[in-house]
Image: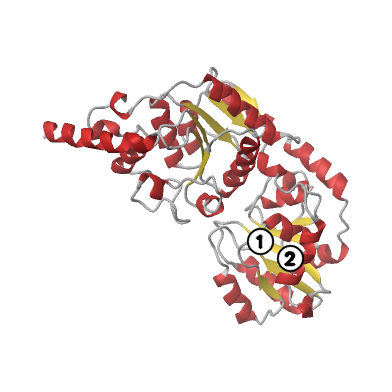
Amino acid sequence: MGKKWCVLLGLLLIFSFPLAAQKPTVLLIAATADEALAFQAVSNELTKRSVPHSLVGIGVANPLLAQNPRSFSLRGGCHVRVPIHKNAWPTTQRLPEGDLMRVSTCLAPRLVLVGTHSRVQAQLAALFRKKNARVIAFYDDFEPPSAQSVAGAIIPYAHTILLSQETHTKTFQELLPKTPLVVTGNPKHEAWEGQDPGDLMIVKRQIIPCTHLNKKVILYIKGSNTRSNDTFEEFLAYIKSRQDVVALFAPPPGDQGAKEEAFARMYGATNFIVVPSGYALKTIARAADIVLCHRTHLGIEAALAGLPVAYFDTQQGVFKNPLTAAGLIPILHDAPALHKFIEGHTPVPNKQAALSRKALGTSVGATARMADCLMEALHKSAPVSGFEKLPWQSPGELRIPF
């Protein structure tokens, strides 16, 4: 059995290594929509600096990155067999040993930027570190990690940890006192900066019917992991009663909004419109008069861009973020509160954006700072180890220990 395995491994190496030379030397691996947005911003900066790289999307991050010209598919490029590209891929699900081996023979990056929300990211961080790659972890959560969390399984394999908030510095210093920390801020908070005013009229003319063009526009955004519930139904009932407004719904990545559209038809809300795919969310948001969110952190980007934003949630105490906690974004719990906000809210964009950044403990320039860190790490990186030099000799020893 051992001889057969050696022969099989030899054939694997022969056919895999010529391909590996063509694979990317810098990988950015995202597993959430937030990580995908942040890493796309970093990718644009790396492109300006002529740094070859690729983006890898896992689960819900995949549809956001799939159309990017720098996207690399583990399914198509490395022949991973499990459906890691689908939205339904659980963050707690690991890659089986066979697929880990396929990734190992397929990719040999010198530098890896990895998020901290998926077990697959933990596996790949450990795998590539074993292959002598430089591993950088990016932590973007609002709550500090625990040693038992997914992030706690990833960060021990990182040579450097990038933090989106300075408030987490002490926690990470206690967890990993010898690992360098860099507070970069979050590039996704800069993604909504800059907008061609002409795009707004294009969006309104292409998405909103002529009969609704002169109405107040409300953009409704919900989190990718939240289902249609009492909050959404109460929102629909309110929208139906307000024929002087039109509601746009931007489905989460990989979702077409079919369920929400069916609910709208059931309620008879003819002024509820599902936005088709292909429109940038920041453009739709700027075309709206009010951005209304449900259990998604995208309200933060809207506030940082100076847009009028609120959360609508009939259940109290379920969702929060630093800006709702600071009172910079209101949380509305019923239709009367929603009506009062729509009728009486007067945004102060510049003040709102400045206060939001202060509450988040972040500032502009996160994208450039993160790219600087990657450039520095790339200069320190060394040629990676080949598959045959990894510290295992049989499939059983390939198992990543978490």
Residue 119 lies, in percent from the top left, at: 43, 41
Name the quarter where the C terminus is drawn. top left
Tell me the crowding category of disc 2: few under 14, some 14 to 19, or many 20 or more residues within 10 angstroms, Cα based. Answer: some
Q: Earlier in the sequence, mark 1 or mark 2?
A: 2
Nearer the observer, 16 or 387: 16
In this picture, residue 150 sits left or right of residue 270: left
Look at label 1 and name its amino acid. Tyr
Residue for point 44% across, 47% down? 73
Nearer the observer, 247 or 76: 76
Q: Is residue 111 visible?
A: yes
In this picture, residue 109 sits left or right of residue 175: left
Q: Quadrant of residue 225?
A: bottom right
Q: How is the image coloured?
A: secondary structure
Provide the residue designation for mark 2: 203
Look at label 2 and name its amino acid. Val
Residue for point 78% across, 62% down? 200
Taking the view exactly as shown, the residue that stands out farthest to the top is 178
| Residue 279, numbered circle | 1
Residue 134 lies, in percent from the top left, at: 49, 25
Nearer the observer, 211 or 241: 211
Residue 44 lies, in percent from the top left, at: 64, 41
Distance from the alpha carbon under mark 1 to that under mark 2: 8 Å
Q: Secondary structure at mark 2?
A: helix
Q: Quadrant of residue 208?
A: bottom right
In this picture, residue 160 sits left or right of residue 272: left
Check if mark 1's residue and mark 2's residue have beta carbons within 8 Å.
Answer: yes
